[in-house]
Image (cartoon, coloured by chain):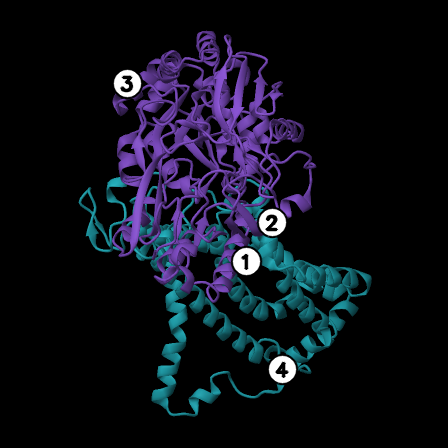
Amino acid sequence: MTETRTRARGRLARLVAALAGVVAVAACSTTTGGADAGGDSGPAGEVTAAGTYPIDSLDPHGPEGASTGTQFAAQEIFSRLVRPAADGSLTGDLAASWEPNEDVTQWTFTLREGVEFSDGSPLTAADVVASFERMTQLDGPNAANFPGYTMTAASDTQVVLTSPAPDASVPGKLVLFYVLPEGVAADDASFFAHPVGSGPFTVDSFTPGENLELVPNERYFGEVPQAGRVVMRTIPDLSARLTALRTGEVDVIWGIPDDQLETLEGEDGLTVETVPSTAEFTMWFNSSVPALEDARVRRALWQAVDFPAIVEALYPETGSVADAPVPPVVLGYAPQDPVDYDPQAARAALEEAGFDFSTRLRLQFANDEFAPFVQAVVSDLDEIGVQVEPLEKEQAVFTEDLLALNWDINFQQLATPTFDAASNLGRLYPCEAGRNGYCNEELDDLLAQAAASADEEERTGLYDRASRIIWQDAVGMYPMNVSIAYAWQQDLEGLTPDPSGLPDFATVRAGGS
Amino acid sequence: MTELSEQAFGAPAAVPGPPGGRAARRGPGRGRARRALARVPYVVVALYVLVALAGPLLIDYDPVHTPLEDRLLSPGEETASGATAWLGTDGLGRDVLAQIVYGARTSVLIGVCTVGVSCLVGVALGAVAGYARGWVDAVLARVFDVLLAFPAVLLAIVIAGAFQRSVPLVVLALSATAWISFARVTRSVALSVRERAWVDSARVMGVRAPAVLLRHVLPFAVGPVVAMATLEFALVILAEAGLSFLGIGLPPSTVSWGQTIAGGKEYLETAWWISTLPGIALSLLIVNVGILGDQLTARYRSGGLGRRPNRDGSTP
């Protein structure tokens, strides 16, 4: 499930993790502090980051491959063919250039010359092909983006990716594909204890779920990182994370809720910045249940919720009212007409459509940080007499029910990590996907055409038409684009807030130089 | 354990005088102050029960409705509708005072139901075990011991987490371990009382076992069980708040102190009142119920079992 920002945080697990976090804070408070709080650390300084999600595994091809923690670690240790820039455009990482063939079924990537792994062996097309095969064989969540795709080496510096059907979003999808040396077995514990990669850092020590210490990779093909050491620590509890930032124990944190931002902004020595992310609050209606079959009903429900007011009250800084099914940083974004809040019209429309007001709609969501938002939506629908029951579920139960369509309204913070609408609209909305009970042949057609075109302008046009159908038929409600708030010590230099919540530390320098 | 309990219930019979005897010796003024102080827990607990019963009739509150324009008002500020939020509002603009009042109702209701259920089950099983003895007692006593080995809150979390949230589920989850202490107390009372002369005579006269249990044995368990129930009541309320704090047990549409406290934990720095005030309400109730329980225990220890047989003229 790439879209759910895998958060396997069971409530019990969270309690245990919070305790573990407290213990970790207590354990570390004696050893760090001087290194980064002082002004004399220089270019060899240590940078400590506190992530929201634990890093449980370093294997980007394995079952944890799509989790935020693993992605975060993988981008520092390994290289990929292409990588997203902060504005959502793609730049070459291992690939110097890439181009599709006529009918967009084959993409040829030309590799950068002279790339070496951290153990000194050269990185060749054979390694890329072996990594792709390893990813497909392990059948992790990222492999689901490439069903039936094959990769071959055309020469030592060229690889060709062949897809069974035209696919223009291949470069975007490859953002999640990392290259390992040839010959790494499926469960190679000894390799992942000291992984060999071609990224900007190498692993110094790693404790799953707790912390990861990185040192610069001297053989990195780009500019060797200036931070002497990067420590990524997991502190799941929000207030513990905020305290650690204030005391200077960690240098950067992100994913800060709005109500806490205000207090951080007033503090000396901290920089606070928000960046629009690829995530959007997405509230699908289950169009396959009788109560919500009618597009008029779905539209009316959307009309009955005052999203601008809710977003303004709950997410004044990290939220903005959405105007398309995908956020602006994603390729394929095309603004639609806003849905105006009008409870009277909504009530009238529901009555006209013959909506049964005794129905109790089940609204499912997975994370308690969204409970206030969901409650506010429930409150607005209650105003016009529509009964909605908010159901907060464990992540695993939520995902299972989501796929089984065991819900009436589904709330999700849906991210598009590939920066391409193909992996959002193209993957989730066709009849065949069966993800929200909605089926429209015209939409299927448009999405297939968009996938088969390599021309960005043409694709955006097609996604515009597809978005209009999704918007008009209210396949879901699209209330809010999400921004991610970052806060870091002012003496930390070179940090660029990342729209996916995966900041890159290759360019970061501890202060004082 | 059995031996110890029997002694504990037998021994106080030898202590002379009423429970207030020591206080009475220290001059009338002090004694009166002490007695007044001793009544405080009764008053406080009665106040909570009154609030739980009458409060919801006076204060209107709908947990579903979220007036966002009133969010995070500090105590005493005026809401958009012109009312005063005496104890402030939470992150969704809901009144904290109303949440405390409705939460009191939930807590008292769950406390009473849980204690009622566990009391019924515990007393019945304990009395049967103590009176029947033999293999019935051996089996039941071991069951009590085994269940006692489970941490109560952990078992409640497992049960409450496995099913759909509802009030009866919380009562069930909390009763799952709460009844054991009742069973143990009743069993030890039954074990000792069944050896007394009046029970023997009842048996000899051909009174049937259930009647003997009900009329000649169980009345002696009332004292310790009431004291026990009071203490359990406090523990149950605390456990319920704990479950709600973790987000298991009660559905979001039911107001509960634990949920309100959990909802305010992110605002501890900026809006202290959301977590603090329900927290104070919770601790006040628990401390007072606890003191009340201690007083009852002390009273029934010294008078409960020994006095009545003495008055009848039978052997203590």
Which chain is cyan in the picture?
B
Q: Is residue A278 at all visible to an observer of this figure?
A: yes
What's the chain of the residue with tag 2? Answer: B
Asked if the residue under mark 1 is in contact with the one under mark 3, i.e. CB atoms within 8 Å, the reply is no
Query: Which residue in the protein does label 4 denote?
Result: B310
* Residue B129 occupies quadrant: bottom right
Front residue (pair B148, A192)? A192
Query: Which chain is home to disc 1?
Result: B
The image position of residue A225, as x and y in percent, is 45, 46
Parent chain of label 4: B
Nearer to us: label 3 or label 4: 3
Between tags 3 and 1, which lies in front?
3
Q: Are marks 2 and 3 on the same chain?
A: no
SS at mark 2 in the image: helix
Q: Indicate which label's residue lies in the foreground, 4 or 1.
A: 1
According to the image, label 2 marks what residue?
B158
- Residue B115: image tag: 1
Which mark sits nearer the N-terminus, 2 or 4?
2
Residue drawn at x 55%, y 32% is A399
Q: Chain of mark 3?
A: A
Q: Are marks 2 and 4 in contact (CB under 8 Å)?
A: no
User: Looking at the picture, which amino acid does disc 1 mark?
Assistant: Val
Q: Residue furthest right?
A: B135
Determine the CA span between mark 4 and mark 1.
Answer: 31 Å
Please give the letter of the chain rendered in purple: A
Query: Are the residues under marks 4 and 1 on the same chain?
Result: yes
